[in-house]
Image (tube, helix red, strand yellow):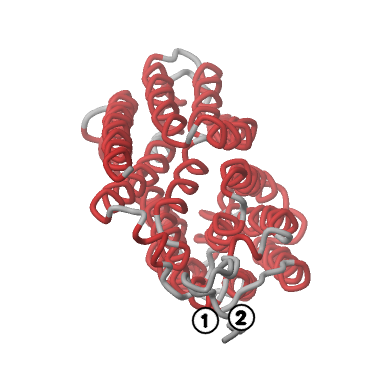
Amino acid sequence: MVLPASSPASPLSGTSPSPGYAERNRPHWRRNLAVCVFGSFTTLVSLSMLLPFLPLYVEQLGVTSPAAVVQWSGVAFGATFFGTAITAPLWGRLADRYGRKPMLVRAALGMAVVMSLIGVARSVTDLVALRLVAGLIGGYASASIVMIGTQAPRERAGWALGVLSTGALAGNLVGPLVGGFLPGWVGLRGTFFVGGAMIAVAAAATILLVREDFDRLRDTQARAASAGAREPGAGRAVIVALLATAMMVLLANMSIEPIITVYIGQLGVPRAHLARVAGFVMACSAFGSMLTAPRLGALADRIGSWNVIVGCLVATALVMVPQAFVTSWWQLAALRGLMGMTIAGLLPSIAKLVRQSVDENRSGKTLGYLQSAQFSGQVVGPLIGAQIGAHVGLHQVFFVTGALLVVCAVVNHRVRARSAAAQRVRA
């Protein structure tokens, strides 16, 4: 009896099994990577460009008290991250079931519509609600990580995810710069329409250029051979450690955001220049990460992701501590840039390890949990930094964050050792 071409070969048939998802999409992953980099850059430019004028838009929507403006601006900004943290695992699960490209298209079209609707918000509650919806139905960068993480060859996955990370970082860097001058040309509300149009371009590029060979029956089947190759307990420990590390990376990077303007003011910067200098210092971290993310991703491909994760955690902790002792803003900017360079290797390496630690038919869901952990760090980090800065002291924010990174490095080292020991026992 001859097996159908679309069915996996029987282990007893003597024929080779049908190719898996990654193997079938090998011809497409480079093109898809280029489109995903462009889409991640475009969508994150649109989402982050409101930062410089968000308080002004809140005022335009009827909020007059300075304290209320600050409060509502913070809620509106964090709503998108909160929404993405909630739904990322769901979209990852659906990507496993229906394919990665539909999730990219869904995110781009949904964000294009919602971004335009923000431009016609009638109240601050409309603004917060729409920002929340943008997070719930959006997440183009998250969907891109799921696609590239499952399509890129194992030996190039670190480099590919590093390049993808560079596109996202560039979007977060360029967005506030664009938001600084665009309202002067098209007005505050017009800026959101421009952002929606930019995301619509990314949606069109995704629809027309992204290629995916997805077979729902074949790609949702459990692969007994790969499942049996992993020890369940060790696998869970690895995944938990990696998700916690991903959250810690974003927590460490974002912990200083609420206090950075106040901290720079204590360094002698005139009040009239505080916002400009603070924006520059914030951008230094993203710029440093852009320089090293692909290189550290490629390094993970060569020497192993665990080595890069532990090394980058320790290096980031060491760079974090001197930031508490700076005497000038440019010293802080230089250290933030250096920290961006050391932290850049973490997320691509973590995503690569997560992808390799689960079966192919569960990779999208697990990478969705990874995105949820990252966005949780973006939400929790500023809250922790603000509380420590307000009740303990600004300098202690750096000490606490550095200590948490060291603890995280120790945990990852132990999990790596246990995983290696488990693999030797099975061998």
Mark whose residue sits in front, 1 or 2: 2
Q: Quadrant of residue 211?
A: bottom right
Left or right of 18: which side holds 248? left
User: Counting other residues with Cα less than 10 Å from the Cα at mark 1, is it few (<14), some (14-19), or many (20 or more)?
Assistant: few
Disc 1 designates what residue?
Answer: 217
* N-term-proximal mark, 1 vs 2: 2
Q: Is residue 121 above or below residue 47?
A: below
Q: Is residue 409 above or below residue 159?
A: above
Q: Is residue 31 above or below residue 180?
A: below
- Helix, strand or loop at disc 2? loop
Residue 188, position as x, y percentages in the image: 65, 61
- Which amino acid does the dot numbered 2 rest on? Ser
Query: What residue is drawn where x is 30% and y is 34%?
Result: 408
Residue 55, position as x, y percentages in the image: 51, 54
- Helix, strand or loop at disc 1? helix
Query: What residue is drawn where x is 29% and y is 33%?
Result: 417
Query: What residue is drawn where x is 58% and y is 66%?
Result: 16
Residue 397, position as x, y percentages in the image: 31, 30
Whether residue 72 is visible here, answered yes or no, is: no
- Which amino acid does the dot numbered 1 rest on? Leu
Q: Quadrant of residue 149?
A: bottom right
Q: Looking at this view, is 213 or 273 the one in front?
A: 213
Query: What residue is drawn where x is 45% and y is 58%?
Result: 367
Q: Looking at this view, is 131 or 191 the one in front?
A: 131
Q: Looking at this view, is 103 or 360 the one in front?
A: 360
Q: Is residue 232 above or below residue 112?
A: above
| Extreme residue in the bottom direction | 1
Q: Are marks 1 and 2 in contact (CB under 8 Å)?
A: yes
Disc 2 designates what residue?
Answer: 6
Left or right of 392: which side holds 300? right
Query: Split into 4 quadrants, where in the image is the C terminus?
Result: top left
The CA span between labels 1 and 2 is 9 Å
